[in-house]
Amino acid sequence: MKFANWLRRRSGFDTRAAEYRYGRDPVLGFTAERKHADTWVNSTCGYCSVGCGMQLGVRDGRVVSVRGNPDHPVNRGKLCPKGLAEHYTIEAEGRARYPLLRRKDAFVRVSWDEALDTMAARFRSIQTRYGPESIGVISTGQLVTEEFYTLGKLVQLGLGTRNYDGNTTLCMSTAVSGYKRSFGSDGPPGAYEDLERADVIFLIGANIAENHPILCSRLESNPGKTLVVVDPRVTKTAMMADLYLPVKPRSDLALLNAMLRIIVDEQLYDRDFVEKHTSGFDDLCQSLQEIELDAMARITGLDPELIVRAARLYANARAPFIGWTMGVNHSTKGTETVNAINNLALLTGKIGHAGASPFSITGQCNAMGTREAGFASGLPGYRKFESAVDRAELAQIWQIAEERLPTSRGLAYPDMIEAAISGKIRGLWILGTNPLVSFPNVDVLKQALDNLDFLVVQDGFHPTPTTELADLVLPAAIWGEKEGTYTNSERRVSKVNAAVDPPGEARSDFQIFLALAEKLGCRDELFHGWSTPADAFEEWKRVSAGRLCDYSGMSYESLETSGGIQWPFPAGSSEAPSTVRRLYGDGVFATPDGRAQLIATQWSPFPEQPNAEFPFILNTGRTVEHWHTRTKTGAISILQRMSPRAWLEMNPADAQKLKLNSHDRVDVVSARGRVIGVELRVTEIVGQGQVFLPFHFVETNANQLTQSAYDPISREPNFKQCAVRVEKQSGVNV
Ligand SMILES: Nc1nc2c(c(=O)[nH]1)N[C@H]1C(S)=C(S)[C@@H](COP(=O)(O)OP(=O)(O)OC[C@H]3O[C@@H](n4cnc5c(=O)[nH]c(N)nc54)[C@H](O)[C@@H]3O)O[C@H]1N2
Ligand SMILES: Nc1nc2c(c(=O)[nH]1)N[C@H]1C(S)=C(S)[C@@H](COP(=O)(O)OP(=O)(O)OC[C@H]3O[C@@H](n4cnc5c(=O)[nH]c(N)nc54)[C@H](O)[C@@H]3O)O[C@H]1N2
Ligand code: SF4
Ligand SMILES: [Mo]
């Protein structure tokens, strides 16, 4: 029994342990007794894409506690530290409560009517003067799918602009582009169960121990696996590895191509699968002729024998899993790197079976929902802008003229920012994202926002660095206060429920969209008879029917009782909702001829190599306690105390050369900016010539340093490398 408890705590963070430790609630201030809830509301965690099932404990109209849902198939009762403290976000300091309109230099509180009248009038007058596409919308991966579906329709058919994108372009757009090029559609093909059933697991640029902690407990229930971690930094995940490959920054593509070459040369590929289910084999082989093991070993910094070992390990595995996250996506070579990963799976036929999957681990709680239902890089239901058939089908469902659907996408997020600088975009609506902290080379963004005629920011918190710059702030309900669905990384749609009302006059994003549609005069046409997210869900089910992301067999009730359903789940499906589903098990891909595409790729050095003036490569990323720009976790004292400020990791050999010691305060300087007074951590977690800075802290904003370099295919920023120097602190941050 004792052993079982120990195991449970080791492999997750047990709710009871946390309650014991935090007997007197440090945030809400009442004692453990008062935390005993009267009722428990089932929901899904609103932080990361693991999608843990949760129960929110409600007492006297307040959420006083949360616990893991023991019956949920994803987390089986476990939660990570952020999840365990999530209820504190609801009553955290700094929630946005009232619409605020900037008059001269100060915000004044206005009614919702006045706020939305002003928004509609200002956007329309900008459009009259500069054309419909002078308005841009930047959304998020943190709303419910019903909201994404509603927003996409509202922006395209109501506001009438194609310039709609989200923070997902800072995050997942590379995986989306890579999947589309290789398999014909977006959609991670595997399931979390694969972590338990794979015999070999590669994690490339994915630090799940910090960022998807509950996936670690899925890994731990697979004692027979061999875990290979590819990351230039010795992360907590790397420390779990059987084989750790400390690649040089952004050399993954060289490693993957070397592995592909070895697999072809040693005939370790699946000839039958390649012949029946793929195109492009000859071109791929030809491109691999240029790949030489010794050269790739130099680029990656790995011994040639290690690369050979990794290639054989993958190809000879019964069921290999390759998971990746931002170490791959955040790169100007990101899409090609995803294609090289997919090439490995396709060459060896290791896809669509238990354990075998090239799997993009997603980031935000509902990054998937916006990919499925949104209007940004595709039409709803993974339809393509450029497909006449797809447009006709959608127009038919919506009963609108086909010409109202665009034939190509609008500007991607970074291109909208450029367009604001050049004056093409004049009005911007930012919702559920905080770009003043999260956008690369943030001075460019500031210039863009400065140049706008009208900026609306819709957020659950105020002030944030971004709401502070707005002309209009719209206060939004957040997790715990609204209803809908999230899709996690394994395509599992889970129910999200409201446990309490939002503070002040804050409204759910869904209600804000409907009210704005009313003001724009399109509510009746686009959202006839809608009043709750369930109305959007019912229409979305029809729009997704027959598509890869088919929801048509789901209902809110079945999502509740099953603890989430993986798509595709068509109406009339004979499978039980709880069945684990994988894509492409039949070898038929979402391309016109059903064949997946093998794609030749080419490594090249990352932009902005270190030089005499800026000798270090800056890597940026996350820590387990904090969520992105800390609007939520910065307001939660338990988490904030565990990780109160940023730090810079530097290798001891470099620190010695610079005569720096741990805890010194240093400045980090790039060609674009200076971050002042970061605490130094001298550690071998990072290699020589590399430094690491978390990007959570606006006071020491990593994006003051990062560069405006983007993947040409996905438009995702190269957040993980830029050239910097490190100096003893020069001044104080203001
Ligand atoms: N605690 C916490 N959890 C989160 C989040 C959070 O903010 N906080 N955010 C969520 C979101 S939206 C996302 S997208 C995910 C992100 O999850 P991750 O991708 O795991 O997070 P990061 O720390 O950004 O980067 C991952 C790793 O990439 C490595 N890396 C850097 N350069 C390279 C390279 O050239 N090659 C390779 N192979 N690796 C490299 C870094 O060293 C780092 O360990 O986390 C989600 N979960
Ligand atoms: N240097 C560097 N920069 C990075 C990264 C990196 O690794 N390095 N990672 C990138 C990645 S992967 C990501 S995903 C981005 C994340 O960057 P952001 O999207 O800017 O980060 P968040 O702090 O999650 O911002 C979400 C905002 O939405 C608000 N919010 C929360 N819930 C709701 C809601 O229900 N409705 C509304 N309207 N608002 C809500 C929050 O208060 C917050 O202000 O950062 C990117 N930036
Ligand atoms: S692992 Fe992700 S989904 Fe699960 S509790 Fe932690 S933050 Fe929430
Ligand atoms: Mo992300």
Image (tube, grey):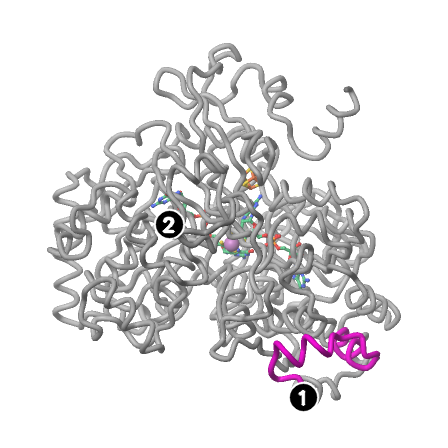
Query: What residue lies at 51% left-to-right and 52% top-to-bottom?
Result: 491
**Residue 346 at x, y percent in the picture:** 66, 72
Picture layout, residue 278 above or below residue 706: below
Q: Mark 1: few, some, or many residues within 10 Å (few <14, many ≥20)?
A: few
Mark 2, residue position? 145
Q: Nearer the viewer, residue 210 or 178?
A: 178
**Horizontally, is 670 left or right of 6 in the view?**
left
Picture layout, residue 537 above or below residue 707: above
Q: Amino acid at mark 1?
A: Asp
Q: Mark 2: few, some, or many residues within 10 Å (few <14, many ≥20)?
A: many
**Residue 436 at x, y percent in the picture:** 42, 54
**Image mark for residue 282:** 1
Mainly helix, strand or loop, the magenta region?
Answer: helix
Q: Secondary structure at mark 1?
A: helix
Q: Are marks 2 and 1 in contact (CB under 8 Å)?
A: no
Q: Nearer the viewer, residue 31 or 725?
A: 31
Q: Amino acid at mark 2?
A: Thr
**Horizontally, is 481 left or right of 281 in the view?**
left
**Horizontally, is 458 left or right of 27 in the view?**
left
Residue range highlighted in magenta: 258-282
Q: Quadrant of residue 159?
A: bottom left
